[in-house]
Image: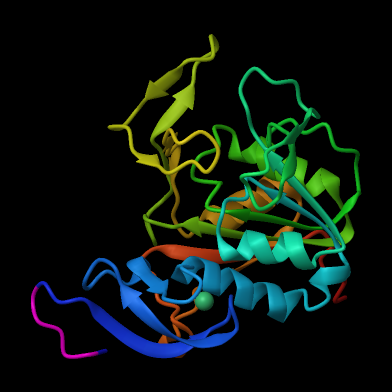
């Protein structure tokens, strides 16, 4: 870190795993590492952590059948679209039937299927890898969403997500839920994050804790690794975001 004075932008040099270049990382918000942006590709630390995890656990991702739910404009999604031989994007759009193919040339993916992550129209066992970036803090039924992801994965398939784990060692808690009538009921004061498709904020439904891995495993039968990468040489430090890797495969028989 440079010796920053109050009001001064902090920056440091390092290697960006997303654009694969030596770069300068800039803290857009001084002293908050999750604001650190690569000056070259504008990615943030959670994207760099996700891309490192992708290369480490699924080095042949370019040849895999990949489903990315809710991709944005970021460099990770751009690279997946450009380099995957078999890439499928999906977005949720209320009121549009699941399975509808939408063309949106503004997005890097250019086209996507409308899908409710909790009730997908995709067939069973069709994807090698599913990727979500900061989606699971916005789903109303994370148990159904992860069960659907497991259903659509081939046996032996994998899943990578980035997700804020703001509760750390405390239990996960719900912020908002859907009523039977389909309206949003706020249990805690509403919080919103940016939404890549409609410009409106996406409401935060769950504040996750470290129990997210066990929760997702119980709901899906998959098993999960949780990775907290802290490596300023690659511009990766985040106050709350973790990367989870899920595997759709049986536990080993060690008898
Ligand atoms: Zn970069």
As rendered, which of 23 and 87 lies closer to the eye? 23
Across and down, in percent, residue 35 comes to 34, 66
Q: Quadrant of the C terminus?
A: bottom right
Magenta span contains residue 12: no
Q: Residue at 45% x, 50% y: name it.
A: 208
Across and down, in percent, residue 28 comes to 29, 67
Magenta span contains residue 4: yes
Determine whether 66 is above or below 188 in the image: below
Q: Which residues are magenta?
A: 2-6
Q: Residue at 55% x, 46% y: name it.
A: 136
Determine whether 61 is above or below 117 in the image: below
Seen as rendered, the residue at the extreme front is: 105
Q: Main secondary structure of the magenta part?
A: loop
As rendered, which of 6 and 145 lies closer to the eye? 6
- Horizontal side of 96 relative to 204 (left or right) equals right
Seen as rendered, the residue at the extreme top is: 181
Q: Quadrant of residue 30?
A: bottom left
Across and down, in percent, residue 98 comes to 76, 26
Q: Quadrant of the N terminus?
A: bottom left
Q: Residue at 45% x, 36% y: name it.
A: 199
- The colour scheme used to paint the residues is rainbow
Instruction: Give the tally of numbered discs.
Output: 0
Q: Residue at 62% x, 72% y: name it.
A: 51
Determine whether 214 is above or below 206 in the image: below
- Horizontal side of 50 relative to 183 (left or right) equals right
Q: Quadrant of residue 11?
A: bottom left
- Horizontal side of 97 relative to 153 (left or right) equals left
């Amino acid at each position: 870190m440079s010796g920053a004075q109050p009001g001064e932008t902090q920056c440091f040099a390092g290697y960006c795993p997303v654009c694969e270049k030596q770069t300068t990382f800039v803290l857009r918000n001084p002293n908050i590492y999750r604001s650190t942006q690569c000056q070259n590709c504008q990615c943030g630390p959670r994207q760099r952590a996700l891309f490192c995890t992708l290369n480490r656990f699924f080095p042949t991702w370019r040849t895999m059948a990949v489903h990315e739910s809710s991709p944005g404009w970021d460099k990770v999604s751009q690279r997946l679209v450009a380099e995957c031989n078999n890439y499928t994007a999906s977005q949720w759009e209320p009121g549009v039937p699941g399975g509808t193919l939408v063309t949106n040339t503004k997005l890097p993916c250019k086209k996507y299927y409308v899908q409710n992550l909790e009730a997908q129209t995709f067939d069973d066992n069709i994807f090698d890898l599913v990727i979500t970036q900061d989606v699971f803090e916005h789903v109303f039924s994370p148990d159904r969403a992860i069960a659907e992801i497991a259903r659509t994965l081939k046996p032996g398939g994998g899943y990578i997500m980035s997700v804020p784990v703001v509760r750390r060692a405390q239990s996960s808690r719900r912020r908002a839920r859907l009523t039977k009538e389909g309206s949003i009921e706020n249990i805690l004061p509403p919080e919103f994050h940016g939404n890549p498709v409609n410009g409106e904020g996406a409401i935060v439904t769950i504040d996750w804790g470290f129990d997210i891995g066990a929760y997702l495993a119980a709901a899906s039968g998959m098993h999960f690794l949780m990775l907290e990468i802290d490596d300023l040489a690659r511009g990766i430090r985040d106050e709350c975001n973790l990367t989870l890797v899920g595997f759709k495969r049986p536990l080993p028989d060690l008898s």
